Image: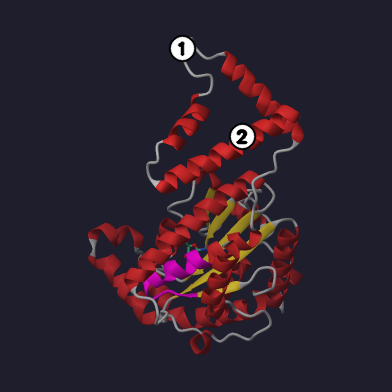
């Protein structure tokens, strides 16, 4: 079942993945307005809902297993839809298992450290999904487009001289390789927005009072660097999509389709990790049996010793909905097995 879902998702997201080693030219290779011809907006809602379900289920297992962590890096130009994507795609996931960090203009303290320091402080723990709303990739994007930002980083001359971007790509690839080897999956998503769609979304922010807070005049001014950003994104995708931390380019002009894609990539990643609930060993079973005996002994007079188990037994005889009955029987059998094992332990 999981294998089928994984195959289906893999096929769907394959065209979005940047093949490691391939040379990317955004305008030529990826269409921001793309949406799969076989998917209507209505179907999209159902797919998104399924994706949200998969995420919720697997995140719980991820937390229980406590071995792997997931880092999701979200990059986009302004109005690319990062905030909305996070809100929709993660809507079914237990907030305890997810951490979102947004990276803005760095503080004086942050500028006084190596350029990966502030990102490293927000990495996920094992069992967690961390989402970077903007990420360490700003260090080869906005910092590249505005070289005066590099000047503010207190770097020694060799670290800001010729070849600085190629060196940063290598450093970032190595950092992510290290993370991957330690059990942290890195997934990188670039929401690819067209210049015209950005113009329309900015106007919406200007026109609607409740959206005004999201807009600053500098966002519009930044549009004059559009081509520089496209070049920086293209070079970043070319140089930092790796087997251990691939980039996915998400067509972002249609919000609903972008969300379906993001949810598919994340579901595919988690299914790939295939986290499992820890196996209950003999020692733990003994502990459980002991705990049950104690709890049963505390039953008030007239109450069932174990109402939960009693409920399972009672539910079985009454027919009811076939599915519920089957489920109850399964649970009952499982319970019986566990009991037998516990007795032997
Ligand atoms: P927003 O995410 O729209 O609230 O804006 C955050 C701003 O911080 C954007 O304009 C980013 O370009 C800027 N920013 C993020 N990271 C860096 C960085 N490392 N250096 C300089 N500016 C940054
Ligand atoms: Mg902004």
Mainly helix, strand or loop, the magenta region? helix
Q: Rate crowding at label 1 as few (under 14), some (14 to 19) or many (20 or more) other CA atoms within 10 Å.
A: few
Q: Position of residue 280 (x, y in %)?
A: 70, 39
Residue 336 is marked as 2
Disc 2, SS: helix
Report the residue at 29% width, 60% height from top. 211
Residue situated in front as seen by the camera: 61 or 212:
61
Chain-order first, disc 1 or disc 2 = 1
Q: Tell me if residue 96 can be seen.
A: yes
Report the residue at 61% width, 57% height from top. 70
Distance Cα–Cα, label 1 vs label 2: 24 Å
Start and end of the magenta stretch?
Answer: 250-264
Residue 140 is marked as none
> What residue would you read off at disc 1?
302
Q: Where is residue 176 in the image (x, y as percent from the top left)?
A: 70, 64
Report the residue at 41% width, 77% height from top. 223
Q: Residue furthest bottom?
A: 28
Residue situated in front as seen by the camera: 70 or 79:
70
Query: What is the quadrant of the C terminus in the image?
Result: top right
Disc 1, SS: loop
Report the residue at 62% width, 51% height from top. 124
Q: Tell me if residue 135 can be seen.
A: no
Q: Where is residue 327 in the image (x, y as percent from the top left)?
A: 49, 44
Query: What is the quadrant of the N terminus in the image?
Result: bottom right
The image quadrant that residue 333 belongs to is top right
Instruction: Residue 255: say if magenta.
Output: yes
């Amino acid at each position: 079942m999981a294998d089928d879902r994984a195959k289906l998702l893999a096929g769907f997201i394959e065209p979005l993945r940047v093949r490691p080693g391939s040379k990317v030219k955004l305008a030529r290779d990826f269409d921001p307005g793309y949406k799969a011809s076989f998917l209507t907006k209505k179907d999209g809602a159902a797919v998104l809902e399924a994706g949200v379900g998969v995420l919720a289920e697997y995140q719980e297992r991820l937390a229980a297993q406590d071995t792997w962590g997931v880092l999701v890096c979200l990059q986009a130009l302004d109005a690319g839809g990062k905030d909305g994507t996070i809100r929709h795609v993660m809507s079914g996931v237990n907030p305890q298992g997810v951490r979102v960090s947004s990276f803005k203009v760095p503080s004086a303290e942050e500028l006084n450290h190596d350029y990966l320091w502030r990102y490293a402080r927000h990495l996920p723990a094992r069992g967690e999904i961390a989402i970077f709303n903007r990420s360490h990739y700003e260090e080869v994007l906005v910092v590249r487009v505005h070289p005066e930002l590099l000047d503010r980083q207190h770097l020694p001359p060799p670290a800001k001289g010729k070849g600085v971007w190629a060196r940063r790509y290598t450093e970032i690839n190595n950092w992510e390789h290290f993370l991957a080897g330690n059990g942290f999956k890195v997934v990188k998503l670039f929401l690819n927005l067209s210049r015209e769609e950005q113009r329309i979304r900015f106007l919406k922010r200007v026109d609607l009072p409740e959206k005004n807070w999201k807009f600053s005049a500098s966002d519009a001014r930044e549009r004059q660097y559009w081509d520089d950003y496209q070049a920086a994104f293209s070079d970043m995708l070319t140089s930092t999509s790796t087997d251990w931390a691939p980039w996915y380019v998400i067509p972002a002009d249609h919000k609903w389709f972008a969300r379906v894609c993001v949810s598919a990539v994340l579901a595919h990643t988690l299914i790939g990790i295939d986290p499992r609930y820890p196996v209950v060993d003999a020692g733990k079973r003994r502990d459980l049996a002991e705990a049950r005996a104690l709890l049963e002994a505390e039953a008030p007079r007239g109450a069932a010793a174990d109402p939960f188990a009693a409920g399972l037994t009672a539910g079985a005889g009454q027919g009811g909905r076939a599915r519920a009955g089957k489920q109850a029987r399964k649970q009952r059998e499982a319970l019986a097995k566990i009991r037998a094992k516990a007795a032997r332990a």
